[in-house]
Amino acid sequence: MPHRPSGSGSTGTSGSGSGSGSGSGHVSRSSGSSASDSSPGGTPPVGEVWLVGGGPGDPDLLTVRARRLLDEADVVVHDRLGPVSVLTELPESVQLVDVGKRPHHHPVPQEEIDQLLVDHAKRGRKVVRLKGGDPFVLGRGGEEMAACLEAGVPCHVVPGISSAMAAPAAAGIPVTHRGLATGVLTVSGHDELDLPALAATPHTVVVLMGMGRLHEITAGLVRHGRDPQTPAAVIQQAWTPWQREVRSPLSDLAGAVAREGLTNPAVIVVGAVAGLPAAGQVTGVQVTGAADQGAGASAAAGAATGRLSA
Ligand SMILES: C[S@@+](CC[C@H](N)C(=O)[O-])C[C@H]1O[C@@H](n2cnc3c(N)ncnc32)[C@H](O)[C@@H]1O
């Protein structure tokens, strides 16, 4: 089981942020040499790994605990999705390691990420594994936790706001709604889908990682009996300045998305809730600081990219 987080979020690590990354060429910033990793007295005490959910992208949607841990970390191992602009705000002492995955392009294999976390922690460091959304929702956080615990490395979990809920919310779509849907099914479009079950469910269906198979999925649902007029939506890059959405009857969703040019990362929502009149007209749901993020976020992303490629 993961350790229960302490009140301060800090449980006595001894790392100082020095040293280069292990097992990856993606180290973006290093504040020292790996030669200083061992204490004069021998092996440093084992550090710890924090699996931290970063939410869908807006840094304001990080939890307070997540934000504090980022500042306290010796090493932050991060993805491409999530609040990457926050990385530019971290103290210089924090070493950044980019293991971001893109669809069909996994620069750092999962086993290597697992090993990276273990290796850094075994050097006595406080390692934050910053993941998009929630670590345990289609994020392979369970595997990373298992790898740490198997290696004797204490592991903590900080939940984040999953895109499965946050992306529909950004478009004003409540995933449940009295009289329309009493539940929600979140599924991976990467994997084998039980289309007959998804076509028959009264619950809202939210598909992550499904854009590459959008036509196959929507046509499959209709083929298995879902009403072609079922309201549906795709929300791209929710809670970022690049958020876009398309709403359409299920049978035309893939066509509408193609016409509008929406791409990954995005979630697909199928169900009556996507047809609520308020959907798309909410004014209370806005990306914080969106007005200045057009330039600001690009600059931040650029700055982060610059650091990552350094
Ligand atoms: C590997 S899964 C990680 C999910 C993550 N653990 C979570 O809870 O949101 C990546 C997928 O999440 C979805 N996703 C993540 N961030 C998103 C965002 N800001 N807007 C829309 N979809 C997003 C996309 O479907 C993307 O392909």
Image (tube, grey):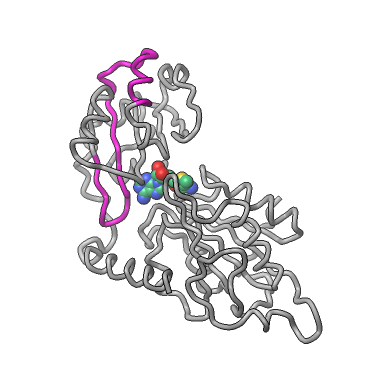
Residue at figure coordinates x 34%, y 25% from the top left: 218
x, y percentage for residue 137?
52, 43
Please tell me whether residue 239 belongs to the stretch shown in magenta: yes
Residue at the bottom extreme of this rendering: 40
Using the image, determine if residue 236 lies above or below residue 181: below
x, y percentage for residue 14?
68, 77
Residue at figure coordinates x 42%, y 39% from the top left: 208
Please tell me whether residue 149 belongs to the stretch shown in magenta: no
Horizontal placement of 133 versus 45: left or right?
Answer: left
Which residue is nearer to you in this view: 98 or 188? 98
Which quarter of the rendered picture does the C terminus lie within? bottom left
Horizontal placement of 66 versus 205: left or right?
Answer: right
Question: How many callouts does the rendering have?
Answer: 0
x, y percentage for residue 94?
52, 76
Question: Magenta segment, which residues?
Answer: 216-245
Residue at the right extreme of this rendering: 41
Which residue is nearer to you in this view: 304 or 145? 304
